[in-house]
Image: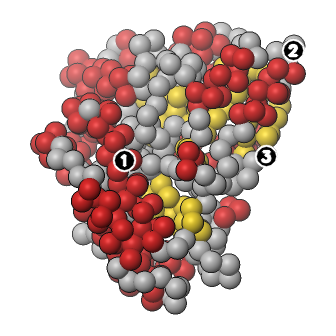
Amino acid sequence: MSFQNPVFIPGPTNMPEVLRKSISMPTLDHRSPLFGEILHPALAGVKKILKSESAEIFVFPSTGTGGWETALTNTLSKGDKVLVARNGMFSHRWIDMCNRHGLDVQVVEAAWGAGIPTDEYAEILIADKGHEIKAVLATHNETATGVKSDIAAVRAAMDGANHPAMLFVDGVSSIASMDFRMDEWGVDVAIAGSQKGFMLPAGLAIIGFSPKACAAIETADLPRTFFDIRDMRAGYANNAYPYTPAVGLLNGLKLATEMLLDEGLENVFARHHRIASGIRAAIEAWGLKLCAQSPELYSDSVSAIVTPEGFNATDIVTHAADKYGVAFGVGLGEVAGKVFRIGHLGSLTDVMALSGIATAEMCMVDLGLDVKLGSGVAAAQDYYRNNAVTNTRTMAW
Ligand SMILES: *Cc1c(COP(=O)(O)O)cnc(C)c1O
């Protein structure tokens, strides 16, 4: 691996220098107004990125997985029923967590490459006349398969059934890189992590709770201590945490939100879409297919690329690291060995993306795949030439 090359794993993502430096701080009193000057703007920035007026934001020293646990334990009781689709490794792991917490988990199985089957969700919700389902779980962007699901459609299925369940959305690999609308989609808990769209190291679980989700804590009886949002809320009111906060990371989060909002969220999403489209043009030129079954499912933050039958896709990832010092993502779970992934979220430019495409191409040719050197690069160059945007705000950082 070379520190000079960008990484193309779907998190942790490349860190802009200004963010990397912002994390490195002298020690300060984490129960002082000075800490409040870091904490409160960071929380306010996250709220804007979630596109929410009413959410309460909580940031735990943790990762996305801790965000899942925060959502479940603050709102649900042992034996509560939850509805969730399994269409990749991340939804699979969230389901596992629900089981371990003793929830009654209704799993809708879907192909790895398919989106959340919202029609099935609708049928199940309509049939649940007694409103036993307390929460509907949705993985917005399945990082394992490069599939983006339609959260507005999940909300529509819930509303169509007049169902009062809460909606929890894992947005770990979508928030801050793809369009996310907490209020408009009626999301009750939104979950992100610091190391993907926020361009920071791992270490923070970033979570939004709707007023309805906040109220649910009064009856929820799942055990919680570290992740209790009431303790966190009480801490925030005193410019503090219930324990020692990760001050440097929070300073990074404050700056990351400023950078994203300064570039403009819609510009951030457009940049991710443009970079992803160039990569997809390359994949098509290679004669390969995405794991995502249809274009409306294509993720703008990660592409999982299916390699020909009989070829071990993981070899590409190993070879890229060994020979060229570049990191791609391996296939996980059911698609292990069948796909390799190009992560294209966070701090990335068209030019950086071209280097990843060129490297993947060299690896595939080295390993004997029927891919023409330069084919993907040329297709992406064409796309980027014709869709270039000079975004002065991005460059300002
Ligand atoms: C990365 C990721 C997670 C897990 O986050 P950790 O920070 O590794 O705990 C959860 N869900 C999705 C969709 C992810 O991409």
> Type of residue at label 2?
Lys
**Element at label 3:** strand
Displayed quadrant of residue 332: bottom right
> Type of residue at label 3?
Glu
**Element at label 1:** helix
Displayed quadrant of residue 269: top left
Residue 214, given in percent of the width and then of the height, sits at 57, 13
Residue at position x 52%, y 85% from top? 370
Q: Earlier in the sequence, mark 3 or mark 1?
A: 3
Badge 1 vs badge 2, beta-carbon distance below 8 Å: no
Displayed quadrant of residue 373: bottom left
> What residue would you read off at disc 1?
272
Q: Nearer the viewer, residue 193 or 238?
A: 193
On screen, residue 121 versus residue 178, left or right, reads: right
> What residue would you read off at disc 2?
129
On screen, residue 145 versus residue 25, left or right, reads: right
> What residue would you read off at disc 3?
109
Q: Nearer the viewer, mark 3 or mark 1?
A: 1
Residue at position x 87%, y 14% from top? 129
* Alpha carbon distance from label 3 to label 1: 29 Å
Residue 266, given in percent of the width and then of the height, sits at 32, 33
**Element at label 2:** loop
Residue at position x 29%, y 66% from top? 381
Residue 310, given in percent of the width and then of the height, sits at 68, 82
Vertical position of residue 333 compared to residue 125: above or below? below
